[in-house]
Amino acid sequence: MNDSAGTDAVSAGGTWLPGPSARMAAYFVHTQTIYPVATAQVQAGGESPIARQTEEVFDLLEGVLAEHSTDLARVLRCEVMLSSPADFYEFNLVWRRRFPEDPPARWVVGVGDTHPVPGCRIGLHAVALAGDSEHERVTVRCGDTPDTLAAEHCAQAVRAGDYVFPSPVAAIEDYERGIEESANPLEAPAAYQITKVMERNQRLLEEAGTSLEHTIKTQNVMSDLRDWVHINPIWGQFMGSPAPPRTSVSVDSTIVPGARPLPNLTALVPREGNVKEELTEGVPFAVTKRGYNFSAAIRTADYVSLAGHLAFDYSKMEPRGGNRAMPHLHSDVELQTAYVMEDRLGILEANGLGPEAVCEAKIYLKAPRDDLWGFRRAWERWYPAGDGPVVQLIPVTGIHFAGTVVEIELLAAAER
């Protein structure tokens, strides 16, 4: 694994997130969440605020990628967080200009007015093929799934080497009708929608030479966290065993009205020497025994993917943290971040990896403007010099179990 601290955080949209602007692992470049600096200024007669901010974010992304000897043409998937779904059209106009041909896959969610700095309307992070990689970037097309390329100008999926990056799409049959309701009034809408989404993902992954059973990393994003009980059993049926690591959170909104689940998947195309392997060493408890259809950790030849974890005591069924009777004498986000990191890094250590192996950290915060600074203080315990993994911040409305304020999902380079 090659590691580079990249640009200073200021040039990547502010000093809000710790760590480098990008990090290389295997034959990929993972970027930090990038934010615009000019969050409020709009020139008279110029572009809309979201268009101007999107242009700036792409300028910054180009700079980060260039410092790691790659470029926009080699981006595989972007994960985009908009303050409002109403900004999508203007955002997408800029997207089309920046990716005029052969665009990458894309995941877009609405997060409300929760970005670290007021006035910020967009945050974006990406994974790109390294500039010196001999692998090709291949666009995957499947005629039996909604045509994202024609409607949204993003790839249905992109494959590079042994890995496939699909575009998450809501449970629509096509872009004319939007979300369709189940004909069965007794079927929960979320159950109906996740079935449609997973069936489509299966067809798409088969076109790419793999299947859902080879999924290695997932984010189960919902518009309503209460839908988890309907999604979880169906998820298990499609994913098989071992199911991939998973993070389950709710977000403010989705781009398609009425959409409930919007799962984000990364899959492996297995071959000799690179297969999906469940890790059990260092795992505190078997999640499947508690009815959760995911694995704590999965290893491939290149990565160890860890499920999102939160500070919760499953033996007592209560959140881990400070004294609830005196909540202002401590920082919940600092205590919970420390607990989660000790747990997740313990799994890596049991499998021969240290904190330096972590290349990407997705941080799900319920209150980013209040809790980012406490998270940063806790984070410096393991990465004091800012040279750890890239940090990708996803503002969420719901994390499982009341009292939990942060969920952390780690991806590490699987050096053997």
Image (cartoon, grey):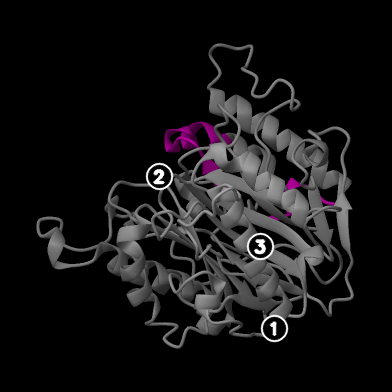
Q: Nearer the viewer, residue 170 or 67?
A: 67
Q: Residues within 10 Å of mark 3 (few under 14, many from 20)?
A: some
- Please report the residue visible at 64 percent of the width from the left and 39 percent of the height from the top: 89
Q: Which residues are magenta?
A: 210-233
> Residue 397, labelled with which disc?
2
Tally of marks? 3
Could you tell which of marks 3 and 1 lies nearer the N-terminus? 1
**Which residue in the protein does label 1 denote?**
1
Q: Is residue 18 above or below residue 362?
A: below
CB within 8 Å, label 3 to label 2: no
Could you tell whether 183 is left or right of 43 in the image? Answer: right
- Quarter of the rendering containing residue 414: bottom right
Return the x and y of residue 42 as percentages of the image width and height.
52, 54
**Which residue in the structure is indicated by mark 3?**
58
Query: N-terminal of the two: label 3 or label 2?
Result: 3
Q: Residues within 10 Å of mark 2 (few under 14, many from 20)?
A: many
